[in-house]
Amino acid sequence: MVSFSAVAKRYRGGEEALKEVTFSVEPGELVFITGRSGAGKSTLLKLIPAIERPSSGAVIVNGQNVGALKGSAIPYLRRNLGLVFQDQKLLYDRSVFENVMLPLAFSTHSTNEASRRARAALDKVGLLARERSNPIQLSGGEQQRLAIARAVVNRPSILIADEPTANLDAESARRIVDIFVEFNQVGVTVLIATHDQGLVTQYGKRLLHLEGGRVQ
Amino acid sequence: MKAWLRQHRHAFARALPRIELLNVVVIGVALALPAGGYALLESVRAVAGRLAVEPQISVFLDAKRTNVDALGTILKRDPRVVRLRYIPRDQALKELGAVQGMGELVAALGRNPLPDAYVVTTSEENLESLAKDVAKIPGVAQVQADALWARRLATLARLARTALWLLAGVLGAALIAVTFNTIRLQILTQRDEIEVSKLIGATDGFIRRPFYYAGLLQGLAGGALALVIVGGSLALLNREVRLLAESYGSDFRFAFPREPDSVAFLVLAGLLGWLGAHLSVSRHLKEIEPR
């Protein structure tokens, strides 16, 4: 489903964020990518939806070589992925419901079906009662749950989360990871980057530890 | 197809609030100048057409010596003659009497002093040579070539037309610049939304579409306002023009551009707005990550 083969990523200026990274993630697997700040976790996750391109090596997602994809094909790749970011990237001039509707605006679903899916996603993360609120009125944990609802509303086969529990208290962080685990239990492949190794070890899932841009 | 239409409806709905009234006013005022100029020029051209804008020669005949039909045949055979009109002396007097203020003078004449005449329409380059040749034909009393008048009028018309095209070009470029800048500001203010849309799988087309609609609609609205300004201005001008024209026995009025011209003008304004949006979007969307 996702495989990295001898992937390296060098940024302009010569900084090498990833070195010879090789691993693969099977369908339905949940993998925690751990490591300290600057270990290359975010860079690794950005290579999957082609936010960044590898300098060398191959990144294969759902059978497609992401590094070789044309720019016009990238949006269609991203529609099959659910992305959750540390800073959530919510739109604060829209309601909770409208934020979740955003990925459905360019889907083929009818307006009724899109609304139904958006509400189902909000229900899944426990925010249906807040659908008319503005994201600014939500707590940090709720904002992260809203970001998850937006990521899953298109029912992606792969969920990718970059430090989704950063800046959250322990209880909220656990609740966020629990949500990802629930999605994984229904067959969604999940990759979560986190520096909080203590939080993720209790789930007994696969850990991929990065250090200095290499998988340990 | 349904999804495609829905996306366009969505883009259209998102574009509507992006149209800024002040920009529409700026565009409308700017476009009103060439549109108004065009309306004035077309009105004057219509009148000038009636007054013989084309180079003409008036051939006055010697009443005692001329065989009118024979002279007409000679003139018709000349390849330089584009059109030929015979004006008998009685008709000439009647036409003179119909001119405002001339009726009493004509009535006081007692007899008709005017000769029979041919009015020969030719091309500008043949005007002088034809006039010289016609003057040599027996039975022709006098030839009057309206070369200077025709040349001056034609030159003035060309000058006005060129000036109008230049003005339209400059103001069209201004429309593009206004739209370019408006869309640039909209892209800047919606940077977060564009970034998020790109991250969750929006195509370039999906992101660009509302901006294209905004440019198109802004251009159309500006064009429509320009036509309203032109219509209003012409109506005001015509109040005075009517009085002036009536004193010369004329029904001259400044005419609003014809329907096809107005539609073409609106389409052009919309296209220029779209072009401004396209240039702005092409340049500024690239700056927003992720690409």
Image (cartoon, helix red, strand yellow):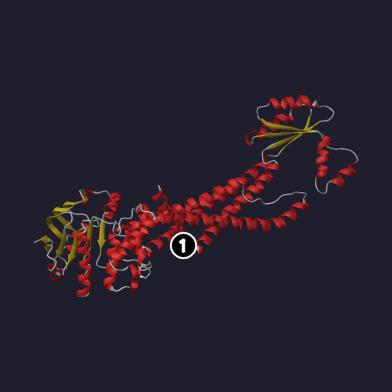
In the figure, is residue B82 to the left or right of A215?
right
Q: Would you name the residue on which mark 1 appears?
A: B17
- The chain that hosts pointer 1 is B
Q: Residue at coordinates 31% horizontally, 68% vertically from top-left?
A: A127
Image quadrant of residue A9?
Answer: bottom left
Q: Quadrant of the C terminus of chain A?
A: bottom left
Residue found 85% across the figure and 46% down from its top: B103
Image mark count: 1
Position of residue A139 in the picture relative to residue B15 (left or right): left
Where residue B126 sits, quadrant-wise, is top right
Instruction: Work out which residue is located at the far left of the displayed protein and give it.
Output: A216
* Disc 1, SS: helix
Near-viewer residue (B140 or B272):
B272
In-front residue for pair A110/A73: A110
Residue B196 sits in which quadrant?
bottom left
Residue B159 visible somewhere in the drawing: no
Image point 16% across, 66% down: which residue?
A: A38
Q: Quick one: label 1, few (<14), some, or many (20+) residues within 10 Å?
A: few
Residue B161 horizontal/vertical position (percent): 58, 47
Give the amino acid at mark 1. Pro
> Where in the figure is residue B84, as x and y percent of width and height?
72, 31
Image coordinates of residue B101 in percent, x first then y, are: 83, 49
A54, A29: nearer the viewer? A29
Residue B208 horizontal/vertical position (percent): 38, 55
